[in-house]
Image (cartoon, grey):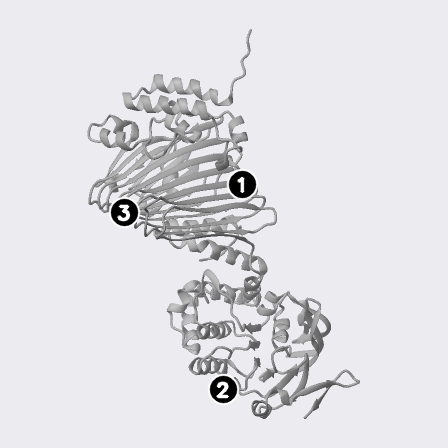
Amino acid sequence: MVTELVKPENNYQSDFRALQQNHPSVAWVELLRSGAMDRFELLGFPSVNEEEWKYTNLASLVKADFRPVRDDRIPEVDRNEIRRNGYPETADAEIVLINGFLSTHLSSIKALESIVVLDLSSAIRDERYEKIVREYLGRYADYHDNGLTALNTAFINSGVFVLIPKDVKLGVPFQITYLSEPGSTNSVSFPRVLVVAEENSSATVIESYRSIGEGRYLTNAVIEIVLKEGARLEHYRLQRESRGAFHVATTSADLGPMSSYDATSITMGAQLSRHDIRVVMDHEGAECWVDGLYVVGSDQHTDTHSVIDHKKPHCVSHQLYKGILDGKARAVFNGKVFVRPGAQKTDAMQTNKNLLLSNEARVDTKPQLEIFADDVKCAHGAAVGQIDQDELFYLETRGLNPELARNLLTYGFAEEVVAKIKVDTLRSQIDEAVLGHLNARLEV
Amino acid sequence: MLEIRDLHAGIDGNEILKGINLTIKKGEVHAIMGPNGSGKSTLAKVLAGHPAYEVTAGEVLYEGRNLLDLPPDERAREGVFMAFQYPIEVPGVSNAQFLRLAYNEKQKHLGKDELDPLEFKDLLKERAKIVEMDASFMSRSVNEGFSGGEKKRNEILQMAVLEPKLAILDETDSGLDIDALRIVAGGVNQLQNAENAIIVVTHYQRLLNYIVPDYVHVLASGRIAREGGKELALELEEKGYDWIKTTDNKDGGVALAG
């Protein structure tokens, strides 16, 4: 008998074959999936030897032997339970995925008649949208260098396709809720979303990641966003997975001429999380905000890698990431801003600020500017600090006990990011969540 | 209300206050004057409980209790207030949020009713008139982007909300133009009554034209070099601080020359 040493990622090979058998797709998707699987086989999971993964060790994720959730094992979920956690603003504009599979039963899209919302697997076969899906799916979330994105791409099946047609101004925000129900086994889900905003359309999307029940699981999500000329998208991303979760995700946005992309990522959950966000400005006159807030404690680990790529002149980018760390938490921020040759009149501003609430928390921050044009306005900076003693004393002299004073200052630190959230109930929820994370009681 | 006995204090091992004695009764306004480096701001900070300053000798009794035993927040809830020379900016926290929090902490401490946001808004609106501040300041972050004058007015607004028994105004006149000075001083005068006491720490006599002290104490080299009524401030203004030359006598006290 011959025993063979198998690499851990080979477990995915059999699951991939099962997917091909049970969920055959159209030829180009089959090709995309197998190409991505081959790529994953070659790349494997990222390791700390790679520069981009220096501070985030996926060894325990690799060892955990996560198995893809099959769609015949989708658990029953009470719709009321979902609405309880929803925002009044998105009551009739919520798309729900469970373990990566779109649930029409749990979704409610009555308020979304002016746009197109489809299961990705249907959109692929829908003659009205097949062309556009084919053009953009897998185009911006590059899987050639990233094993995790490759794996998600290999398992493209269900998911969400959103098309905001030309000139449509969507009056309500729409929400994509990613629910994980880990069940009894270590499961992995591969949520996949494609959002295309056509010329001069505008919309607001809230992505919300959370889980039902405890248990170890992996979310490996990819969302691709395409903004055509003059399109505007406000994008909130809220990651509040359970502490048993590993969360890796890629956001790729391609900005058309004069388009505007305003992203705010709030990270609070998961044992280990990694978010790669890439915004490509390959047309003149585009503007983006790539902001975020991470609030982590105990032994949580969170990593944000961001790339803002100025390829054409007259584009503006703003980036503000703030972090609050307690316990033995660790955070990584790596933000690259590229200004390519010829991208004159670029205006790029990048800031990462971190507040450490304990002596054992740690941040590795690396803002990077790479400029290959000479007529640009660029600035960047990073800071890691603790609560300012003068500020603390000031609040104490007004009768606030030291704990309350600390909490108020921490809350104030987060507000710079939170205050920009334009969806009211989302903003108050984040306010409360920040305070909850600090075990603080503060009416705001 | 306040009794300071032979207070010695300093920072980083340097003694700045070298034996201060001062008694303040309710209803009184005291001015502490002195040249730069004489220790007047240190005295204010020590009374408020700044952690960087170390008291090496002496005692401070506040309403019969040892003030120095209390942490700064408890001093505040017991009615001690210091208006900062350089008020701190607190980004992300609105003036209204902050003031209500501070107000309610004190109410709780005194066993009185707390106010909800709406009730507090009414109180704040009324108190804001004292320093002629309009509603837009209430929703702005504490002191963030405020001009020098606005910050000082905001300090007096905090005083108006917290209604301290003992208010210490640390160089509240510094950086104020004449209009702002009038507003700030007018606010303090409205808040002054027979039940509270006010210590005005200032370099210049100017402020004392508006807030008229009952007593003036002049500090030099960490000791009270001269004491008198309000006319002492005028005399100082005329002759300058050089007029007060201090020499240590053999009792460790201070003798005045000139």
- Say which amino acid is labelled 1: Gln
Residue position marked by numbered label 2 in the rendering: B210
The chain carrying label 1 is A
Q: Residue at x 35, y 27 (%)?
A: A156
The chain carrying label 2 is B
Q: Residue at x 49, y 83 (%)?
A: B189
Characterize the local packing of mark 1: few (<14), some (14-19) or many (20 or more) Cα atoms within 10 angstroms.
many
Does the rendering let one see residue B113? no
Does the rendering let one see residue A81? yes
Between disc 3 and disc 1, the foreground one is 3
- Say which amino acid is labelled 3: Glu
Pointer 3 and pointer 2 on the same chain = no
Residue position marked by numbered label 3 in the rendering: A284
Figure quadrant of residue B111: bottom right
Give residue A300's mark: 1
> Disc 3 and disc 1: Cα gap in Å?
40 Å
Q: Nearer the viewer, residue A98 or A231?
A: A231
Q: Residue at x 40, y 36 (%)?
A: A250
Figure quadrant of residue A237: top left
The chain carrying label 3 is A
Which label's residue is closer to the chain start, 3 or 1? 3
Residue B16 in picture, x, y percent from top left: 68, 74
> Disc 1 and disc 2: Cα gap in Å?
57 Å
Figure quadrant of residue B65: bottom right
